[in-house]
Image (cartoon, rainbow, N blue to C red):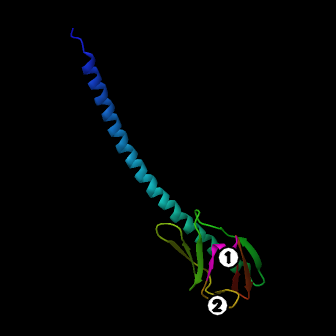
Amino acid sequence: MSRINKGQAAVEFYTFLAMFMLVLAVVMTIFLSIAGNESQRYDSYSVDETAARFADIIHASYVAGNGFNGTFDVPTDVAGAQYDVTFKNAHVIVVSHGYDRDLVSSMPLVTSDVKDDVGSDTFTYNSTTMGGDIQVININGSITVRP
């Protein structure tokens, strides 16, 4: 039987270790790429969920009917970033800032008769001015939104 000398064993060990490290590096690169994509999807879903929440508030106020007056909790940020909410043309549009690009989501509303305090049918509120809640009033089917 031949004996394996110490030098050959060391070379085989380090070759095996190098192959293992190479495979580990490839796998980690793949996982980091997937994690980055999932993070962007999560942020996008958060903006969609916030827009849907505002649309649900308007729908609930509309369905409640004349005389409804309610205060609703709204997010102060979306995934840690400020956002603007715009009511325009029977849609609510949420734009979240603070990323490498602005994330935008739009949801349709049940009515186009949504106004602010001064009667404008196109208006925008910032998440910091809303302070975590909005007041919604239904006056004969016309929905008024106040921060």
Q: Quadrant of residue 50?
A: bottom right
Between 32 and 89, the residue placed more toward the observer is: 32
CA separation in Å, label 1 and label 2: 18 Å
Between 103 and 121, the residue placed more toward the observer is: 103
Q: Of tags 1 and 2, which is closer to the observer?
A: 1
Q: Is residue 12 left or right of residue 78?
A: left
**Which residues are the magenta region?**
124-131
Q: Secondary structure at mark 1?
A: helix
Q: How many marks?
A: 2
**Residue that label 1 marks:** 129
What label sits on residue 120 in the rendered view? Answer: 2
Q: Residue at x 77, y 79 (%)?
A: 69
Q: Earlier in the sequence, mark 1 or mark 2?
A: 2
Residue 140 lies in magenta, yes or no?
no
Amino acid tagged 2: Ser
Q: Quadrant of residue 12?
A: top left
User: For the N terminus, which image quadrant?
Assistant: top left
Q: Quadrant of residue 23?
A: top left
User: For the C terminus, which image quadrant?
Assistant: bottom right
Amino acid tagged 1: Thr
